[in-house]
Image: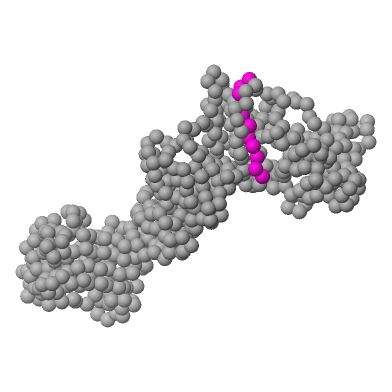
Amino acid sequence: MKKLLLLGSVALLGWSCSSALDEYPPIDFVKGPGSETTNGHALIDGRAASFASIAVRKVDHKAEKAVEENALVVTNLYASAEGYFDVNIPNDGKYRLTVVHDGVAYTKVVTRSDFAEPGKADVPDTVNLVATGIVAGIVDVPEGSSSVWVGILGTDVLVKTDSNGWFALPAVPANDSLQLYFVDEKYKKDLGEETLYVQPMESVLKDYRSLDDGKVVVLQKDGTPAAYATVALRASDAMVEEYAVQNQMVDSYFRTDTNGKFTMKWPKKGDYRLTVVSDGFAFSKVFSAKELPDLDTIKLSATASISSKVTLRSSAEYAWVGVYGLDVLVKTNNVGAYVLPNVPAGDTLSLYFLTADSNSLYAEWKTAAEPYSTQFLSPVMVLQDFEADADGWYLNIDSLKKGTEFKTANVKAGIEKDSIRGSKVFHGKYKLANDDYAWALIGTSFEHYMNFAAIDSIVFYAKGNGSIRLSLENWVSPTVNLKAATDWYSLSSKWKRISVNPAELCVGSANEETCFTTWNAVKGGVKQFHIFVEGGSEFYVDDVTLYGALF
């Protein structure tokens, strides 16, 4: 192993040997609080860190020999059963004090004046141990070498990378700035140092390979460096790998240094979302691979929350909601409402929605929010604009009324350019039987029964020489036919904007129904969307739009 700097009163030979315990009386580790030798007290959540391992090393201490050591420190002394210990900090400079106990640790750079002195202090200094972190990383392996040694200055831990440069530090003290050091395979050539900072129970992935790119500086809103901000780079179309609620914006794998700087080996092609997060402030933007090397300074701004909704299938209890390029993932409630907390502001976010079983992409939507805000956003969905072939849309007539016919062969045949609308529209010509109940319609049938309980309104444009109505239906058979329809709207030769909210869907399948009961009978399981005409001989329809719906 290595020669150790033994500090304090340590007489521990044979501590783990039962025969030695039989031969010698029990060892008195330290004296009680307030004694001449006790100057430290180690606690874990307010309880004594019994027999915690304690060591002091110079701040620039490195392992003397190339021997793997997974322990943070090779113990100099142990605390008592009550967590008390004495440690003599030399007066010739700065030292790293490290206290370790079963997955928790405390570490800090101290001088003699920083810590209670044996024989002088009436009250010992308290050190609070917290959970350690885990660090994995990769470093360049010099040409001709098969590995690199990696350690932490001021500790005894020393690990070796594999042939590709990957290493793991299984227990890293949290909440203090540490310095990793790298030495070549023969343990002769210094390969540099890097600052490291982890939080309790944090797992981070670090990339320490040499970079041709310059350093990026991250600044807080006031222009000060964003020290230890978390940084993540994701493909712009990346989705979560595990379907569980994740309120964190990103699960970052490294941080900026104390000056708010970071380096990264940029990808050579593709589009990526770069995200930096620090205490409720964030920067997130999609860049092409060509743009990334030109980054030099980025500024964080306050995050936002987005509250919105998606239209669920009637059989679905919820849907998953995520943001491409981020790790956040939330669930909707049973009518599709959701909240995305603490997302980046000021940049367009591409949202994706997955079915509850996570097997298929359900819908997509782009949106944005302003800093410091909670945005209540209602999606808008163009159900049909007739710019393409209107696949899935059909024409139908009451075949029981002799003399009723559609002169337009099908929806595709009726699509034409309209000079007033400045776009393609549907133009249908028809003939109705001489009967008050004769009908013709244009519409579509949804693949699944849809829960329209949370929609805001339906808007479309129409003109013609008869009347028109909108009907949302759950038509199963001639004997099971639920519908919620509007009254008739008269058409003219001029385009008319028709806006329908659920309170206007008052016509049901029964003779006497209230608007409330009509809509409530259908809204949870809409299967057909129909626009009916009566009277006249032709009609036009364009831009059928659902407000508050997305599917």
In the rendered image, residue 524, in percent from the top left (x then y), is placed at: 35, 66
Q: Is residue 148 left or right of residue 543?
A: right
Quadrant where the C terminus lies? bottom left
Whether residue 265 appears in magenta in the rendering, the answer is no
| Residue at image point 46% right, 54% down | 344
In the rendered image, residue 217, in percent from the top left (x then y), is placed at: 51, 45
Quarter location, residue 169: top right
In the rendered image, residue 471, in percent from the top left (x then y), is placed at: 24, 70
In the displayed structure, would residue 98 be above or below residue 412? above
Q: Is residue 311 left or right of residue 541?
A: right
Q: Nearer the viewer, residue 465 or 485?
A: 465
Q: Is residue 515 left or right of residue 374?
A: left
Q: Which residues are magenta?
A: 176-186
In the displayed structure, would residue 204 be above or below residue 404? above
Q: Nearer the viewer, residue 112 or 39?
A: 112
Quarter location, residue 409: bottom left
Q: Nearer the viewer, residue 294 or 537?
A: 294
Dominant SS in magenta: strand
Quadrant where the N terminus lies? top right
Question: Is residue 42 visible in the rendered structure shown here?
Answer: no
| Residue at image point 87% right, 44% down | 118
In the rendered image, residue 24, in percent from the top left (x then y), is placed at: 93, 33
| Residue at image point 49% right, 53% down | 300
